[in-house]
Image (cartoon, grey):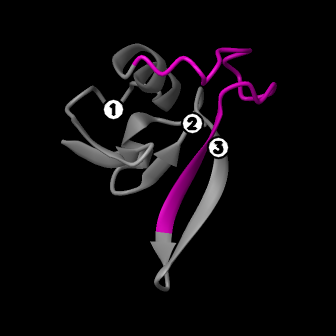
Amino acid sequence: MIQFFLNNRLITTDKPASTTLLDFIRYDENLRGTKIGCREGDCGACTVLIGSLKEGKMEYMSVTSCLTPLPNAHRKTCCNR
């Protein structure tokens, strides 16, 4: 079971670990703002923010969601805006 926040909404899913964050955001959550570009991580069209708590502060990093497996979002916060 994978749990994370997506745009401040708790998501719980049992999608396969091979699912990319891009496909989950676009097709399962119908959030089409995250674009499909090259699917190789080069163009940046699918970039999202993933945040996690570090020493009591939320720390964000940008990732290419086309290369990021869905389980990498577990217990984190994702923003696609």
Q: Amino acid at mark 2?
A: Asn
Q: Earlier in the sequence, mark 1 or mark 2?
A: 1
Residue 50 appears at what percent x and percent y? 54, 51
Q: Earlier in the sequence, mark 3 or mark 2?
A: 3
The image quadrant of residue 9 is top left
The residue that disc 3 covers is 63
- The residue shown at (35%, 18%) is 28
| Distance from Cα at disc 1 to Cα at disc 2 | 20 Å
Residue 45 appears at what percent x and percent y? 73, 24
Q: How many marks?
A: 3
The residue that disc 2 covers is 80
Q: Is residue 68 left or right of residue 62?
A: left
Q: Nearer the viewer, mark 3 or mark 2?
A: 2
- The residue shown at (33%, 48%) is 4
Q: Are marks 1 and 3 in contact (CB under 8 Å)?
A: no
Look at the image and give the residue range highlighted in magenta. 30-52
Relative height, residue 35 to residue 56 (above, below): above
| Distance from Cα at disc 1 to Cα at disc 3 | 17 Å
Q: Which one is nearer the viewer's eye here, 45 or 70?
A: 45
Q: Is residue 8 magenta?
A: no
Q: Which one is nearer the viewer's eye here, 44 or 81?
A: 81
Q: Amino acid at mark 1?
A: Ala
The residue that disc 1 covers is 17
Q: Are marks 3 and 2 in contact (CB under 8 Å)?
A: no
Pick out the residue farthest to the bottom.
55
Q: Which one is nearer the viewer's eye here, 23 or 33?
A: 33
Q: Is residue 40 magenta?
A: yes
